[in-house]
Image (cartoon, helix red, strand yellow):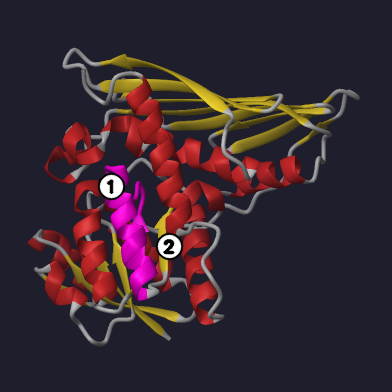
Amino acid sequence: MFKVGIIGCGGMGNMHATCYEAIDGVQLVAVASTNEDQLQKMQEEYKVKTYFSAEELILDSELDIIDICLPTFLHVEYAIKAIEAGKIVFIEKPLCLTAEDADLLLETQKRTGAKVQVGHVVRFWDEYVWLKNAVENKIYGNLISVNFTRLSPLPAWSWNDWFNDHTKSGSMALDMHIHDTDFIRYMMNAEPDNFKTNVTRTKAGVIDYISTSYNFGDVLISAEACWAMPGNFPFKCAFTARFDDATVVFDTDTLNVYKFDGTHEQPEMTNDFDSGSDTGINVSNLGPYYNELKYFIDKLSKNEPIETASLNEAATSLKLVLSEIQSVGGVKI
């Protein structure tokens, strides 16, 4: 039985706690937060130990796993402290804010042999898993092109509004666009031959929309993301994939396959894990989060390497997005 402590009790910390409660072989034992109301809520709901200090939780000898659900700018500090303390570590995405910090985490893992997984949850999202399988096995022939879309209102639920401080989040380009960039690398099992990025910016000069096209040989893939939509705009994630024999369309919760022979399919997905509670963020389907944490615990239980969402994979995706940002002059100009 792996015993886990979560640092950060906001929306993501609550989602992880709910998922751990439903997974065999793991027990949520402790949480840490500087928010006393969050700590009380978590203690009442999950009957866990509470810490006002992340350092104290990391040093708890009862814990095997430290799950870091903190704002991005705090990931490196506490991930390294947890690794140095001999813990297994789960880090929410994006991994960090700079290539230098990503390299520091990789060096720390190599030196200590720590087991680390990063929360690139789209790799565990049923519709995206289905798409990767269709591409790899050429179920509808060769892939021709894919467009990925990810749209959201400006996040209004973050602690001290850190999402909207580009020095802490890296802007939506690093926080949200990275979901699709990472999945594209994973789906293609390769790095793009080249890419071209375009952005729009706020009046303050911060990126609020990004569109990147990637070339993989003859395959053209694009990804657009924006979190400057009106407050009443529903979160949207979607893709349209063209194959030799069909076009596949996914729009937030519906997957359709339109074949050139005139037939239509609607593959059944199993993303139906229900938290039973409001997490406070714009995610209603916790199935993918359950899938990624179950994979994490299964790999640890079998003493197998963490490959699907490894630290190295997360670092590589981070560096690609940082290259996109730099190609248009940086997060803010």
Q: Residue at x 19, y 59 (%)?
A: 77
Q: Is residue 275 left or right of residue 80?
A: right
Q: Which residue is mark 1?
A: 100
Compared with 40, 318 (above or below) is above
Q: Residues within 10 Å of mark 1 (few under 14, many from 20)?
A: few
Query: Looking at numbered disc 2 in the image, what kind of residue is underneath it?
Result: Gln
Contact? badges 2 and 1 (CB < 8 Å): no
* Stretch of the chain drawn in magenta: 90-112
Disc assigned to residue 117: 2
Q: Quadrant of the C terminus?
A: top left
Mark 2 and mark 1: span between their CA atoms? 19 Å
Whether residue 64 is visible, yes or no, is yes
Q: Position of residue 239 (x, y in %)?
A: 59, 30
Q: Residue at x 86, y 28 (%)?
A: 263
Compared with 186, 51 (above or below) is below
Q: Quadrant of residue 229?
A: top left
Q: Residues within 10 Å of mark 2 (few under 14, many from 20)?
A: many
The mark closer to the camera, 2 or 1, is 1
Q: Is residue 35 left or right of residue 248?
A: left
Whether residue 278 is visible, yes or no, is no
Q: Is residue 63 left or right of residue 186?
A: left
Q: Residue at x 64, y 40 (%)?
A: 188
Q: Quadrant of the N terminus?
A: bottom left
Q: Secondary structure at mark 2?
A: strand
Q: Position of residue 218 (x, y in %)?
A: 71, 24
